[in-house]
Image: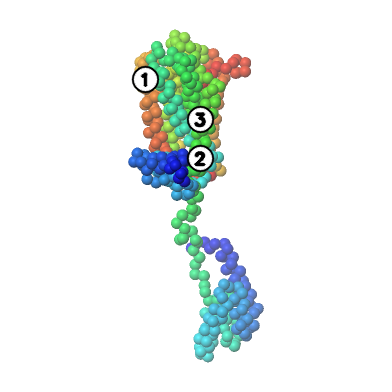
């Protein structure tokens, strides 16, 4: 059974209550004259008054013939013009109408093929303009940075003279930092290998279909911790490691870091 | 407006030349029917579609995208920036290749000469270096952005896998380039890096031998890493980039708003 929408259910209940009140209070008056009843019913329905009046009189005519033999047969009909003041039967709809609500079908289940139409804009100019500006910005940034900061070029490579400390490129300094804590095979191969492997597998491990932050607190915290872990290791390796890869603070021991 | 002498005004001449050019076979062979370069551009929904549809951009972008995909606050443009940096690095890298020979005897001197006596040599090398570091950063941030938006979830799981491969390729590109200046920084950073890879279980020595092209870092290593840096890894990267971009569209554009 389909759920009936709230506003329809309310409207039906209101109408039912109104009909019950009317049946209790106004029954004699309604039965006495036809015209006020028609006027009243026209007030709370969308069916034009003249059509209601026409159908009522047609029904009254039809039942007028039958009334002698079976007075109780007014069951399915409207409030009638018949003189005896029987209260309208309970099967009568609000305002004395005979139409009934068979079922309410939600709009979404039949009519809408796409429940929400996708809001789209033209790639040109909306997206291309943004991309163009972004490309320009990054180029200008790189250019200006390059004008003021020179890339390092130390003395010629010399296999016999190991600089102290020897550092990997900055993105590998987290691994080099791990090297101080674990066996080289663990730090250099196992941990990064597992890391990449888990990263690749993460969409297959995380079966939670929601992309809302409040639904995926665990995944987000795990990832954030992971990122912070690497960021901290890289920062320590970059700025807090001096000669012999020993711990130094950059404000006292100086900076041992080349990009 | 004919002048009494029968001469044409400069404006008439220009428009005549433009008409002739745009009517020529050469011009029409370059721009496809419907191209805005062929029939002129006025701002209309139809022409907005044609800009994409009748240009090479159609390989990259659909005619229309979701409205929220245009919001910079959603993507922060990180994927795009990574790609722009890749292009910038290709352009500056090609420039550098003209002045560089990958041998232990010449590499450092070539870089030094590039910096001191080639016009814009220092600037372009700086851009190449800083652009490379920046690209590693933007690729990392792009990954974080995608994760926090849950954009790796179905149907985009496989594109995430390709993305992780692209991340490792980016690191490889940067790392192989690190050796090429052949200075103390390059040599020892790579020594540290390759020593770590030498601890691969079972095949450690073989891995190291293949990477170095010998038992020690030397001129063979330089040649090897040069070819990896300028040819092999970019080639593989471009293939994965193509798949990555194609999948973005096939999986229904970028992921929805949160």
Q: Which residue is mark 1?
A: B224
Left or right of B153 in this view: A23? right
- From this view, report whether residue A3 is shown above or below residue B110: below
Q: Nearer the viewer, residue A135 or B193?
A: A135
* Element type at mark 1: helix
Image point (47%, 24%), residue name: B128
Disc 2: CA contacts within 10 A as few (<14), some (14-19) or many (>=20): few
Residue A61 location in percent, x, y? 52, 87
- Dot placed on the residue nearer the N-terminal end, 2 or 3: 2
* Element type at mark 2: helix
Q: Which mark is residue A129?
A: 2
Q: Nearer the viewer, residue B63 or B47?
A: B47
Instruction: Give the number of the mark in front: 1 or 3.
Output: 3
- From this view, report whether residue B139 is shown above or below residue A100: above
Q: Are both tags, 2 and 1, on one chain?
A: no
Q: Which residue is mark 3?
A: A139
Residue A197 location in percent, x, y? 43, 32
- From this view, report whether residue A220 is shown above or below residue A253: below
* Element type at mark 3: helix
Image point (39%, 40%), residue name: B21
Q: Which mark is residue B162?
A: none
Q: Nearer the viewer, residue B142 or B18?
A: B18
Q: Alpha carbon of mark 2 to alpha carbon of mark 3: how far?
A: 15 Å
Image point (43%, 21%), residue name: B96
Q: Alpha carbon of mark 1 to alpha carbon of mark 3: how far?
A: 30 Å
């Amino acid at each position: 059974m389909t759920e009936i929408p709230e506003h329809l259910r309310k409207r039906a209940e209101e109408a039912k209550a109104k009909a019950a009140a009317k049946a209790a209070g106004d029954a004699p008056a309604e039965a006495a004259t036809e015209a006020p009843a028609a006027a009243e019913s026209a007030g709370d329905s969308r069916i034009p008054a003249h059509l209601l009046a026409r159908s009522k009189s047609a029904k009254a005519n039809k039942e007028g013939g039958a009334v002698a033999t079976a007075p109780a047969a007014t069951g399915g009909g409207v409030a009638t013009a018949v003189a005896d003041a029987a209260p309208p039967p309970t099967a009568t709809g609000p305002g004395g109408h005979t139409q009934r609500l068979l079922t309410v079908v939600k709009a979404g289940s039949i009519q809408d093929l796409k429940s929400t139409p996708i809001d789209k804009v033209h790639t040109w100019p909306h997206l291309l303009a943004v991309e163009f500006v972004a490309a320009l910005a990054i180029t200008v940034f790189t250019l200006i940075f390059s004008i003021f900061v020179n890339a390092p070029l130390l003395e010629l490579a010399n296999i016999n003279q190991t600089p102290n400390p020897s550092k990997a490129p900055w993105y590998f300094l987290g691994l080099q930092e791990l090297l101080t804590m674990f066996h080289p095979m663990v730090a250099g191969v196992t941990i990064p290998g597992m890391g990449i492997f888990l990263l690749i597998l993460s969409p297959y491990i995380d079966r939670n279909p929601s992309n809302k932050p409040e639904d995926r607190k665990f995944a987000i915290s795990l990832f954030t911790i992971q990122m912070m872990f690497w960021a901290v290791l890289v920062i320590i390796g970059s700025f807090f490691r001096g000669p012999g890869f020993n711990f130094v603070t950059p404000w006292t021991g100086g900076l041992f870091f080349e990009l | 407006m004919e002048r009494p002498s029968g001469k044409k005004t400069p404006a008439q001449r220009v428009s005549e030349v433009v008409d002739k050019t745009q009517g020529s076979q050469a011009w029409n062979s370059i721009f496809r029917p419907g191209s805005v370069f062929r029939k002129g551009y006025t701002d209309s929904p139809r022409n907005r579609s044609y800009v994409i549809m009748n240009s090479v951009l159609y390989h990259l972008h659909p005619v229309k995208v979701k409205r929220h995909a245009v919001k910079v606050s959603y993507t922060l443009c990180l994927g795009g920036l990574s790609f722009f940096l890749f292009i910038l690095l290709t352009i500056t890298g090609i420039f550098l290749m003209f002045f560089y020979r990958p041998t232990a005897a010449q590499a450092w001197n070539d870089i030094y000469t590039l910096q001191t006596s080639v016009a814009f040599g220092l600037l372009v090398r700086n851009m190449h270096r800083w652009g490379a570091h920046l690209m590693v950063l933007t690729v990392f941030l792009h990954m974080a952005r995608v994760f926090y938006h849950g954009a790796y979830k179905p149907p985009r799981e496989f594109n995430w896998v390709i993305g992780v491969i692209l991340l490792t390729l980016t690191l490889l590109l940067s790392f192989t380039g690190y050796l090429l200046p052949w200075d103390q920084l390059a040599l020892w950073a790579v020594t540290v890096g390759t020593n770590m890879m030498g601890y691969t279980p079972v095949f450690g020595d073989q891995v190291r031998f293949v990477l170095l092209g010998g038992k020690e870092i030397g001129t063979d290593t330089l040649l090897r890493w040069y070819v990896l840096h300028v040819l092999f890894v970019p080639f593989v990267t471009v293939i994965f980039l193509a798949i990555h971009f194609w999948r973005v569209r096939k999986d229904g554009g970028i992921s929805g708003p949160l």
